[in-house]
Image: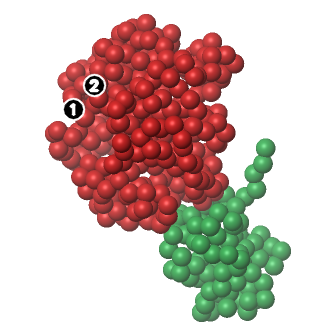
Chain colours: A red, B green
Amino acid sequence: MGSVRILVGTRKGAFVLTADGTRRSWEVSGPHFAGWEIYHLKGSPAEPDRIYASQSSSWFGQVIQRSDDGGRSWTPVGNEFAYEGDPGTHLWYDGTPHPWAFARVWHLEPSLDDPDTVYAGVEDAALFRSRDGGHSWQELPGLRACSGALWQPGAGGMCLHTILLDPRRRGRILGAISAAGAFRSDDDGKTWRPINRGLVSEQIPDPTAEVGHCVHRIALHPSRPDVLFMQKHWDVMRSDDGGESWREVSGDLPSDFGFPIEVHAHEPDTVYVVPIQSDSEHFPPEGRLRVYRSRVGGHEWEPLTRGLPQRDCYVNVLRDAMAVDALEPCGVYFGTTGGQVYASANAGDDWAPIVRDLPPVLSVEVQTLP
Amino acid sequence: MIRVVLPAHLRTLARVRGEVELEVPPPVTQRAVLDALEARFPMLRGTIRSHGTLERRPYVRYYACREDLSHEPPDAPLPEAVARGAEPFVILGAMSGG
């Protein structure tokens, strides 16, 4: 039957939610690292009990924690993220040059096959890699070298928030940065190029510029990694060629603004988004929390509402706060800024909260265990 | 023996309760105390002082003997009462509320 372990990062600590394969009854452990912001936790696909966590605080900076027993115990590992060489400047909000400065780790992406190798996406945007289980971190400077001087932060900071490792074409890495766009490396992170053709952002001086787009999240299905789905600041986009070109698939969504996007574990054309009213009103349209599902890879979307609040709901769902399990039927999970973590054990048809009163949820990851 | 008081979050991170006691050879300075603290608790590196520059993080303060020593030069001697262990060297996070 298998079981499920959900790793939840919040503004005030981490929580681990576990259930058997029925996903009816949940155990909640936490808060781990109480009082600290936990931007992200993720387990190694190669060794699921190996979990990495990004722990940070405005007072005490960045800590990386590692668990080797599925989140029961944790050990701090390396927390030095030094940019390679003289990092120079990027653009500030007002368009003036601004020195690059490390703020925090937004996203941790463990290697698909080596539990000691893990990537970290950081603010100010850069990609780091550890090959010794998180003890030491080295920047992959080719990413910033490709156009970093032109990047500008979004309102949340200039963060590298999405790291996708292509399971079929080893050495291909995709990254996404707010507000710079999507980037791809085909040589294990040495060199990079922007992959933003087809994106249109009316909020920037040149709406079709090579960089400057506020990409919120990209998702792929591992069986078909050349097909990418993107939630942009506005617009839901799709690429069928590994990001070489993008086309809009927002279709009949009530709003195409949002943060997370996720793909069903068994159906590569089934995609989930959570529409948000607008860039200035970060809550669901009409105060009704609805996940939208497309079963045809975009354009046509159906609202999923059963079990979700359909009045007076003004939470947000952040970019890293949605995930799926690999059970049958596929489970879908998301966390809100109101502290709820909702679960659906039938691909989104029905929802129920696992927990209702956590601190604001920053990230949700799911591990499907034997 | 030098006594050091850590803020709650860093006590948890370092897995200590109460004060920390450190052997610090003279001259007893901020830098010498923090070097000794980080040598004994490597997980605290980067949480009080920034990596590389070793500058105090902006929201961290140093107090001792009812004085704010946060802006003292790192190599200036700490008060004699701290050096002989009569008073603790206090590291704390800036207050916030709301």
Q: Secondary structure at mark 2?
A: loop
Residue located beneath label 1 in the image: A223
Pointer 2 local density, CA inside 10 Å: few below 14, some 14–19, many at least 20: some
Observer-nearest residue: B13 or A31? A31
* Whether label 2 touches label 1, CB < 8 Å: yes
- Distance CA(mark 2)–CA(mark 1): 8 Å
Asked if residue A100 shows in the view, the reply is no
Residue A368, percent from left and from top: 37, 44
Q: Residue type at mark 2?
A: Pro
Observer-nearest residue: A299 or A148? A299
Closer to the chain start, of discs 2 and 1, is 1
The quadrant where residue B66 appears: bottom right
Residue A300, percent from left and from top: 37, 9
Query: Which residue sits at x=48%, y=44%?
Result: A19
Residue located beneath label 2 in the image: A268
* B78 shown above or below A262: below
Query: Which residue sits at x=62%, y=67%?
Result: B12
Tell me, for residue A296, which label it has, or none.
none
Q: Quadrant of the N terminus of chain A?
A: top left
Q: Tell which subunit mark 1 falls on.
A: A
* A90 shown above or below B35: above
